[in-house]
Structures are given as C-alpha cells and as structure tokens.
Image (spheres, rainbow, N blue to C red):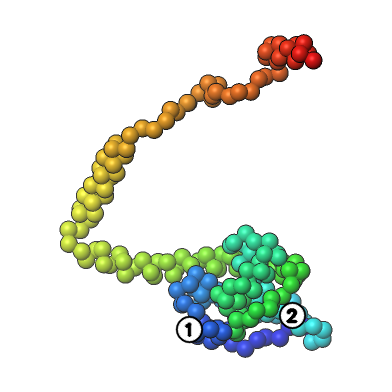
Amino acid sequence: MYRKPSPQMTIDDFILPFAGKPAADNRWTKLAAIIPWDEIEKQYAFMFPSDRGNVAKPVRMALGALIIQARCGFTDRETVQQITENPYLQYFIGLKEYQLTRPFTPAAMVKFRKRFNAKRLADINETIIQAEKSQQEQEKEPDDEHNDSGSGGSGNLEEKSEMSEEEAIAEADAIPNQGTLILDATCTPADISFPTDHRLLNEAREQLDSI
C-alpha cells in the first residue's frame, strides 16, 4: 500500500527545534532541489497496487536514504544514525521537521534496495548527474562573463599563470633537502634475517651452548 504525500516540501517548510532556518546553500539542500521527486514517485507508486496493508515509506525517504548511503559510504546502521543526528539529512529524506527519533530502522534499508533495482538506480543517478552539470554550468556563466570583461584579456591570465609557476619553482628551490632517499628497494636497511642466513644457525648454537 502506498499513499502519495503532500506536495514536495522546500527548505522554507522544514522546522527546526531551535532558532533559525536551514541554510539554502548546503549540499544536501541543493541536491534535494534538483532531484525530480515527483517524477520518480509516479514510477514508485505503481509498485504498490493494493490499497491494503501497511503504508510504505515515501519515495523521498527510501531513495534519499539510499543516496545518502551511496554518497557517504555508510553501513545501514550508520546511515540511520547519521540521519537521526543531522537535520539536513532529515530534510533531504522529506521529513517536515527535525525529530530525535530515527525515522526507520536499519532493516528498512534492505527493503529500500529491493524496491530500486540496478537499472532504476542507474537512470535516477544519470538524471541527478545531468541536473548537477547544468547547475554547475549556470553557476560558472557569471564568472566567465566577469573574466571576459576584465582588462587585458586572456593574455594577462597567461602571464599570471606563468608568474605563479615561476614563483612556485623558486619557492621549491628555496626549501633545503631533508633526509636521504633510497631508490633501490634492495638497498633498504632492515634488521631482519632471511631463513637461509647462516648467522641464524650460529645464534642457535650460541644459545644452545649457554643452556
């Protein structure tokens, strides 16, 4: 059974237990804004044709938890723990306000993975990547226009890059050499005797004589 939640929330709708509002420039806030949750939800709802039984977790919570786990490399238990402690992650998975209790158990992560097969996750990941690229291009356009309008054109930029490289070389030359570098691994000193070393036999003889 699946119930479509209310329209997707924005960062202004999220309620914190303390003063202030979540930052709009946070990485999870930006990522939540570019993911087409409504389009993914249409495909997700078809997986629950029955009107009976327990209500399934919303698609934003299920998919959001998998994205958090994939991006951060968490285990199932650590993913739930991080979401419980981080208000930005709670907003990312669609909670309306910060809560101290965990939104789901680590066992639910197994169910989430079963509902999103490899092909579906690949399509969603491709959509997210394209959206991130378009957003980065939009952010770079004002910077490019500002650089083009500057005096001197690209020639000044080349001179600056050359000067910076020369300064870096000069700074590297000013640093004195420290220590000795051994390039041949066979020359590495080590206080380890090989099994074929005759000194082992001599040490064993000396210990036997002392006994």
Residue at the extreme left? 152
Kind of residue at disc 1: Gly
From the top left corner, tell me how far across and down residue 73 is, in percent: 62, 59
Q: Is 136 situated left or right of 176 in this image?
A: right
Q: Decide if residue 24 is on the left or right side of residue 48.
A: left
**At 17% across and 62% down in the image, what residue appears?**
151
**Disc 1 secondary structure class:** loop
Q: Which residue is mark 2?
A: 56
- Residue at the spot 59% in from the left edge and 84% down from the top edge: 97
User: Can residue 9 be seen at all in this image of the molecule?
Assistant: no
- Asked whether residue 152 appears in the rendered view, the answer is yes
Q: Secondary structure at mark 2?
A: loop
Q: Nearer the viewer, residue 38 or 150?
A: 150
Residue occupied by mark 1: 20
Identify the residue at the far right of this view: 53
Distance (Cα) linking label 2 and label 1: 32 Å
- Point out residue 129 in the picture as x, y percentages from the top left corner: 52, 65
Horizontal side of 39 relative to 20 (left or right) equals right
| Crowding near the residue tagged with mark 1, few <14, some 14–19, many ≥20 C-alpha atoms within 10 Å | few
Residue 139 in percent (x, y) is at 38, 69
Q: Which mark is residue 37?
A: none
At a point 76% along the width and 83% down the height, the residue shown is 55
* Residue 175 placement (x, y as % from top left): 32, 38
| Residue drawn at point x = 32 percent, y = 70 percent | 142
> Compared with residue 171, is residue 84 higher up or lower down, i.e. above or below?
below
Q: Is residue 165 above or below residue 72?
A: above
Of circles 2 and 1, the one toward us is: 1
From the viewer's perspective, is 206 left or right of 163?
A: right
> Relative to 67, does residue 187 appear above or below in the rendering?
above
Choose top left, top right, bottom left or bottom right for residue 64. Answer: bottom right
Residue situated furthest bottom in the rendering? 6
